[in-house]
């Protein structure tokens, strides 16, 4: 079994149900490894889409990749506040190469004021047919979307500013420590 440790760098790979690659993050910095979740930060990280389009993330994002839940949550720390992008996806695994999951289209976008939008319901329905999602997967996905919405409404972790702030401060502290070690080695 491969284990991640705080301070490790790791790739993140998202697939589609048919096994094709969906999106890859070139580098994520591990800030916590919990029993049920990998917590990583992407900060000015290259992202490659399935069509080879590349883009650079604009701000630090604290990402929660759950091991036993059918979603992951990306919290983007911006000047205007914390925005969340929640992906309905299979539970995440780390296989020694990357944190991996299967993206199931449905997304929930959450704004700093706590309002939210459910996105990509048409894409989900289309892929249910095109990729032949089994009925049990379809139900798991809609239940996961509903769970995310309920977490947002209740202000559950990680939809809490202080929780995200603690992780961003931990990230900057770890980066500072690594920079100090590099300077002493030079």
Image (tube, helix red, strand yellow):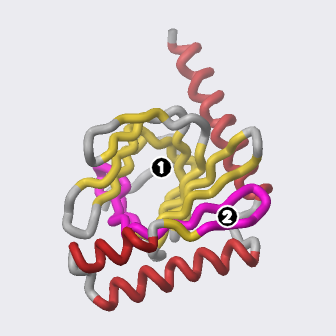
The answer to whether residue 66 shows anywhere in this view is no
Say the numbered circle drawn on residue 158.
2
- Element class at badge 2: loop
What secondary structure is the stretch in magenta mostly built from?
A: strand
Region in magenta:
90-117
What's the residue at 36%, 35% (across, down)? 54
Q: Is residue 56 above or below residue 34?
A: above
Q: Which residue is mark 1?
A: 5
> Was residue 115 drawn as part of the magenta stretch in this picture?
yes
Residue 138 found in image quarter: bottom left
For disc 2, the neighbor class at 10 Å (few under 14, some 14 to 19, many from 20) is: some
Identify the residue at horizontal 45%, vertical 67% (top origin). 120
Q: Foreground residue, 175 or 80?
A: 80
Q: Residue at x 40, y 67 (%)?
A: 105
Asked whether, in this view, residue 100 is left or right of residue 51, the answer is right
**Residues under labels 1 and 2: Cα distance?**
21 Å
């Amino acid at each position: 079994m491969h284990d991640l440790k705080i301070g490790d760098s790791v790739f993140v790979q998202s697939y589609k149900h048919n096994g094709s690659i969906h999106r890859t993050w070139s580098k994520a910095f591990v800030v916590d490894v919990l029993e049920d979740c990998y917590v990583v930060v992407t900060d000015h990280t290259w992202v490659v889409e399935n069509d080879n389009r590349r883009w650079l993330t604009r701000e630090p994002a604290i990402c929660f990749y759950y091991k036993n839940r059918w979603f992951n949550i990306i919290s983007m720390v911006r000047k205007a506040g914390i925005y969340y992008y929640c992906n309905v996806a299979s539970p995440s695994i780390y296989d020694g190469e990357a944190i991996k999951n299967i993206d199931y289209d449905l997304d929930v976008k959450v704004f700093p004021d706590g309002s939210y939008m459910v996105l990509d319901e048409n894409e989900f329905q289309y892929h249910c047919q095109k990729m032949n999602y089994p009925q049990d997967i379809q139900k798991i996905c809609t239940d996961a979307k509903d769970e995310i919405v309920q977490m947002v409404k209740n202000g559950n972790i990680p939809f809490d500013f202080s929780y995200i702030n603690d992780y961003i401060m931990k990230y900057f502290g770890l980066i500072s420590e690594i920079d100090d070690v590099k300077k002493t080695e030079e």
